[in-house]
């Protein structure tokens, strides 16, 4: 059973779409369940000014994408890098155990977008991320 917060973000997702002139883009997918997420960010003065997502997946995948964008919009890159899948799930009031992988995807797509931005702008990539994939370890 999903929480009211999950249902709210599924039925009324925030920041949906794609930024045409994105400063960073991250895309992840889970072949097991078929969920695919793409997050794009615009950054100015080290602050995430705008963020959008496109998600193909279940209600939990859409809800985690939506809340992730809300949680980091207006935050610094360093603050956004600290977001974990646990933070995402807690912000939604929890997820069923079989849907926890969806919160991993949202956090991973964000980390990839941040690492893409940092890589293009000579910044230091996330210390806890794999340099090649941007995946948070």
Image (spheres, rainbow, N blue to C red):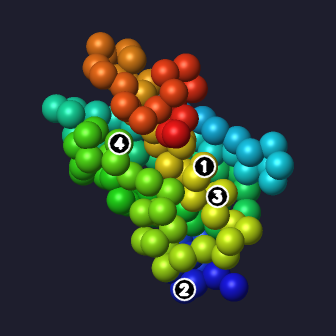
Residue under numbered circle 2? 4
Q: Work out whether mark 3 precedes mark 4 in sequence or the reverse, and give the earlier one.
A: 4
Q: Work out whether mark 2 precedes mark 1 in sequence or the reverse, and give the earlier one.
A: 2
State yes or no: discs 3 and 1 in contact (Cβ < 8 Å): yes
Q: Work out whether mark 4 precedes mark 1 in sequence or the reverse, and give the earlier one.
A: 4
C-alpha distance separating marks 3 and 4: 18 Å
Residue at image point 30% right, 22% down: 124
Residue under numbered circle 1? 105
**Is residue 11 visible in this depiction of the protein?**
no
State yes or no: discs 3 and 4 in contact (Cβ < 8 Å): no
Q: Residues within 10 Å of mark 3 (few under 14, many from 20)?
A: many
State yes or no: discs 4 and 2 in contact (Cβ < 8 Å): no
Which type of secondary structure does the marked residue at label 2 adopt?
Answer: helix
| The disc label shown at residue 102, or none | 3
Residue at image point 64% right, 58% down: 102
Vertical arrangement, residue 24 with respect to residue 83, above or below: above
Vertical arrangement, residue 33 with respect to residue 36, above or below: below
Residue at image point 29% right, 13% down: 122
Residue 21 % position (x, y): 42, 27
Q: Work out whether mark 3 precedes mark 2 in sequence or the reverse, and give the earlier one.
A: 2
């Amino acid at each position: 059973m999903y929480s009211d917060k999950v249902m709210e973000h599924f039925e009324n997702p925030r920041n949906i779409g794609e930024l045409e002139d994105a400063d960073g883009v991250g895309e992840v997918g889970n072949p097991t369940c078929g969920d695919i997420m793409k997050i794009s960010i615009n950054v100015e003065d080290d602050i995430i000014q705008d963020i959008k997502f496109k998600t193909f997946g279940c209600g939990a995948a859409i809800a985690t994408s939506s809340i992730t964008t809300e949680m980091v919009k207006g935050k610094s890159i360093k603050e956004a890098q600290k977001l974990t899948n646990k933070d995402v799930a807690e912000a939604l009031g929890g997820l069923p155990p079989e849907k926890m992988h969806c919160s991993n995807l949202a956090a991973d797509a964000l980390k990839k977008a941040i690492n893409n931005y940092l890589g293009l702008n000579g910044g230091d990539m996330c210390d806890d991320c794999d340099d090649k994939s941007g995946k948070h370890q």
